[in-house]
Image (tube, coloured by chain):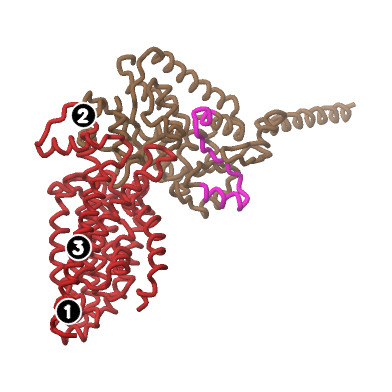
Chain colours: A red, B brown
């Protein structure tokens, strides 16, 4: 291959990537706009536009009820944006975990991060203290702290000298994960009246997300994803094996450390506002890899956007699928992600498993 | 002569003693209609339990059952209750003093403790207890499941426990008292306009639950002179879309207060600032109330109290 050819392949590829990302961003925007129309209350689309216009001071529509305005501005918009943030954070974290562990099963459960968040949340629920800390509810702070502590615990247990081998990290992670979920189980047994609260937290949902929650996690999600993007080349090299990556100039231990902290930070921020929403972190990176390819330079941004689109659509479905039974019924979003996500993934996998096996 | 008198006297004494013994023995034992009822105890699961004698040792594995069995005066036969049972007595103190045995929590009553108590009747509720009930029945225990879906169902269950424990008259008296009190409330609120009521089961960060048409608490709201804003939903307890609550705009909001119920008691100020709730008539007119969840969540003998309390919330001007 001549230099010209290499160059033209490179440009063709980057322009193709740019197009893909652009299309996905467009798809995300359309998803958000369509989702604003989804829910029990039938609010005409022009009214929705009027309400949004009023928020940014453009117009002052007169004939819109305060109930409809509250529904769009205080309920639908925050839960849609929470879906975007959480979906993006979990999917990005999934890419990082799978990249670092070079293991298709890796996700936030592997390092005990989800379990740590669950323990933190359960303890705070049992404490009965709902107090607000710097504008946040205790359960959110506790989940965040629990997730980060679990990650540091696993990381330090697995350390052999200055290195942290992937195998010990995986095994310690699994052991800590089981231990922490046993603690959650124990707390559930003694929970009594608070059992419901723990169970609902473990299933996850966006039912009562506040604007405050969005602002609280936004910086973590943005910093986490942007910082991770600086490591996409290292992730590509790590995929060839740690030794090879080392010889190609990657500071392997440093990269692993940073990437795991970033992934755990993203997960902790996500679960702190909506509880444990399963499947997104595990499956979205795979799904993206099936459709777009394994190069982390494109895998990370596309997974992030697809994760956001996926979770927003799942939350729409949570509000829609059960309405034939009762028009105001809603399902927990964590159940929808698995109920609809898993068959969709299996369908894609069946179509493309040849390329996956290669 | 003397011997004849003696024999006659002994015979008379023996006769009187026998009659007295039979009378005392048969007293409190079922016969006729009572016996037939005792042999055909059909509970809310449709299961037919057949007893031959009134139970001497009753275990109650649900607070609602405990309340009923004590209300009809069969409490002296109760040998075991759950840690959640707190009415009509403070059973925690009884248990601590050794006057009552705890069979543990509500969801997983302790089978070993129940076995050790050798109950001849167990009273249970439905839902999470179904599995325990199946296990107990497989082990040959007589179990009555009280899992009513309506006010009539609760009253029927009080009669059922009366039939099972030989307290038929007392049970009927309790039922009549409840029926009369409900009628009084209904008459009082008969001509008042019916406010739209939102009744909260629980509200957490990730989910909110309320009641639909199939929960008996919807009937409580109706008897108290209101309508449940979700009365058209053919479901009992469920996770609802909060935007539906705001869209339907309740006039009154009833929240769980003190009590051991499912929801946690929150300050009314915290409820008022939930997103979008400030637009409802209830918040704007400051009509938020907290009800003791033990009274309104337990399908027991405090039903009339629940309705009276609800009516006071919905029509404060009439009480």
Is residue A127 or residue A125 the one in the foreground? Answer: A125
User: Residue A19 got which mark?
Assistant: 3
Protein chain holding label 3: A
- Which residue corresponds to the image point at 16% horizontal and 63% vertical from the top-left? A225
Image quadrant in which you'd find residue A180: bottom left
Protein chain holding label 2: A
Q: In the displayed orientation, state which residue is furthest to the right.
A: B1
> Where residue A146 appears, x then y in whole percent?
23, 60
Instruction: Tell me which segment is drawn in magenta.
Output: B130-155
Q: Where A15 sits versus B162, above or below?
A: below
User: Is disc 2 placed on a helix, strand or loop?
Assistant: loop
| Left-right relation of A273 to B10 | left
Protein chain holding label 1: A
> Where residue A319 appears, x then y in whole percent?
34, 44
Q: Residues within 10 Å of mark 1 (few under 14, many from 20)?
A: some
User: Is disc 1 placed on a helix, strand or loop?
Assistant: helix
């Amino acid at each position: 291959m001549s230099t010209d050819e290499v160059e033209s392949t490179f440009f063709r590829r980057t322009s193709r990537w740019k197009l893909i990302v652009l299309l996905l961003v467009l798809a995300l925007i359309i998803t958000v706009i369509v989702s604003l129309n989804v829910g029990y209350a039938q609010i005409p689309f022009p009214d929705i536009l009027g309400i949004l216009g009023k928020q940014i001071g453009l117009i002052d529509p007169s004939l819109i009820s305060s109930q409809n305005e509250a529904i769009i501005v205080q309920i639908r918009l925050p839960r849609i944006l929470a879906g975007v943030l959480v979906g993006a954070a979990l999917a990005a974290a999934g890419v990082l975990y799978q990249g670092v562990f070079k293991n298709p099963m890796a996700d936030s459960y592997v390092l005990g991060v989800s379990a740590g968040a669950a323990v933190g949340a359960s303890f705070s629920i049992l404490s009965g203290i709902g107090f607000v800390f710097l504008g946040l509810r205790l359960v959110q702070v506790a989940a965040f702290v629990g997730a980060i502590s679990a990650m540091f615990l696993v990381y330090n247990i697995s350390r052999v000298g200055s290195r942290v081998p992937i195998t010990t990290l995986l095994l310690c992670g699994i052991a800590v994960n089981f231990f922490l979920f046993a603690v959650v189980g124990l707390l559930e047994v003694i929970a009594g009246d608070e059992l419901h609260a723990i169970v609902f937290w473990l299933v996850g949902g966006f039912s009562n997300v506040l604007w405050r929650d969005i602002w609280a996690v936004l910086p973590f999600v943005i910093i986490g994803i942007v910082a991770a993007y600086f490591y996409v080349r290292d992730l590509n090299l790590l995929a060839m094996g740690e030794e090879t990556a080392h010889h190609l100039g990657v500071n392997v231990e440093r990269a692993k450390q940073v990437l795991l902290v970033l992934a755990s930070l993203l997960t902790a921020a996500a679960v702190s506002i909506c509880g444990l929403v399963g499947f997104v972190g595990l499956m979205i990176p795979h799904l993206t890899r099936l459709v777009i390819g394994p190069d982390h330079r494109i895998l990370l941004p596309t997974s992030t956007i697809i994760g956001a689109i996926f979770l927003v659509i799942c939350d729409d479905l949570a509000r829609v699928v059960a309405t034939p039974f009762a028009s105001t019924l809603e399902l927990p979003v964590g159940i929808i992600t698995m109920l609809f996500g898993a068959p969709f993934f299996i369908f894609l996998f069946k179509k493309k498993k040849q390329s996956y096996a290669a | 002569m003397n011997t004849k008198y003696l024999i006659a006297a002994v015979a008379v004494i023996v006769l009187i003693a026998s009659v007295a013994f039979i009378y005392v023995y048969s007293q409190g034992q079922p016969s006729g209609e009572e016996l037939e009822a005792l042999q055909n105890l059909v509970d809310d699961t449709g299961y037919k339990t057949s007893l031959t004698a009134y139970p001497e040792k009753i275990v109650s594995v649900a607070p609602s059952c405990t309340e009923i069995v004590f209300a009809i005066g069969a409490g002296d036969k109760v040998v075991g209750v759950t840690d959640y049972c707190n009415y009509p007595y403070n059973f925690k103190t009884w248990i601590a003093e050794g006057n009552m045995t705890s069979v543990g929590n509500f969801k997983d009553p302790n089978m070993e403790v129940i076995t050790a108590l050798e109950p001849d009747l167990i009273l249970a509720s439905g839902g999470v207890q179904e599995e325990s009930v199946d296990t107990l029945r497989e082990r040959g225990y007589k179990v009555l499941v009280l899992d009513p879906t309506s006010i009539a169902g609760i009253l029927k269950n009080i009669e059922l426990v009366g039939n099972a424990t030989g307290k038929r008259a007392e049970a009927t008296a309790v039922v009549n008292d409840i029926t009369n009190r409900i009628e009084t409330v209904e008459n009082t609120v008969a001509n008042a306009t019916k406010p739209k009521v939102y009744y909260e089961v629980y509200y957490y960060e990730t989910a909110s639950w309320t009641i639909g048409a199939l929960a008996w608490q919807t009937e409580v709201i109706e008897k108290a002179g209101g309508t449940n804003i979700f009365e058209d939903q053919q479901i009992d307890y469920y996770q609802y879309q909060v935007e539906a609550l705001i869209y339907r705009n309740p006039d009154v909001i009833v929240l769980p207060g003190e009590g051991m119920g499912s929801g946690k008691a929150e300050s009314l100020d915290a409820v008022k600032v939930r997103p979008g709730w400030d637009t409802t008539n209830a918040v704007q007119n400051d009509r938020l109330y907290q009800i003791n969840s033990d009274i309104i969540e337990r399908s027991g003998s405090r039903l009339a109290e629940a309705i009276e309390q609800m009516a006071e919330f919905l029509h404060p001007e009439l009480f």
